[in-house]
């Protein structure tokens, strides 16, 4: 069974856990042998940007000592041969150019989304 995890809500729980919960779960599922892929859409397309640094994250006097490293987590999925897609128009709407993306991210025009979804047995939307 092939599963597509659609991540739309960005940076969910990344302060408490330092990882996006769905990206983390995708690593775990893949490690257990599941055929998973990821589609980034909406604000989550920001995960596809290669050069991210949240090391200066602070709220008032509190400083995040272990900031999220989402780009590294996504790149690690790609290294494990997990397909990671991003909606092209969502990238464009946020001013993100393809040359700034992590190598291996596949962009998909919104108009081809239905065809992509048909390739999977299960769709999980987060």
Image: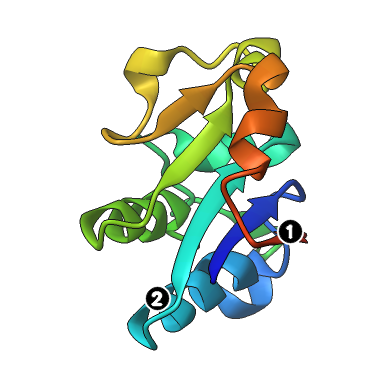
Element on which disc 1 rests: loop
**Residue visible at 66% across and 42% down in the picture:** 117
Element on which disc 2 rests: helix
**Residue visible at 29% across and 36% down in the picture:** 104
Q: Residues within 10 Å of mark 2 (few under 14, many from 20)?
A: some
Q: Quadrant of the C terminus?
A: bottom right
**Residue visible at 47% across and 37% down in the picture:** 48
Report the side of 77 relative to 54 (left or right): left
Residue with the mark numbered 2: 30
Check the image and report above or below for 2 versus 52: below
Report the side of 89 relative to 69 (left or right): right
Q: Residues within 10 Å of mark 1 (few under 14, many from 20)?
A: few
Q: Is residue 20 visible?
A: no
Which one is nearer the viewer's eye here, 107 or 12? 107
Q: Quadrant of residue 88?
A: top right
Which one is nearer the viewer's eye here, 64 or 29? 29
User: Marks 1 and 2, Cα distance to the nearest angstrom?
Assistant: 38 Å
Q: Any mark on residue 60, and which?
A: 1
Check the image and report above or below for 28 versus 26: below
Which one is nearer the viewer's eye here, 117 or 67? 117
The mark closer to the camera, 1 or 2, is 2
Q: Quadrant of residue 125?
A: bottom right
């Amino acid at each position: 069974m092939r599963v597509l995890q659609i991540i739309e809500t960005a940076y969910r729980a990344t302060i408490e856990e330092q990882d996006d919960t769905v990206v983390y779960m995708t690593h775990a599922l893949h490690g257990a042998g599941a055929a998973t892929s990821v589609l980034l859409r909406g604000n989550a397309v920001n995960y596809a940007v290669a050069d991210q640094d949240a090391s200066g994250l602070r709220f008032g006097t509190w400083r995040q000592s272990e900031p999220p490293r989402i780009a590294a987590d996504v790149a690690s999925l790609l290294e494990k041969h997990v397909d990671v897609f991003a909606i092209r128009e969502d990238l464009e709407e946020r001013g993100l150019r393809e040359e700034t993306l992590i190598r291996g991210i596949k962009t998909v025009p919104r108009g081809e989304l239905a065809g992509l979804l048909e390739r999977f047995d299960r769709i999980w939307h987060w």
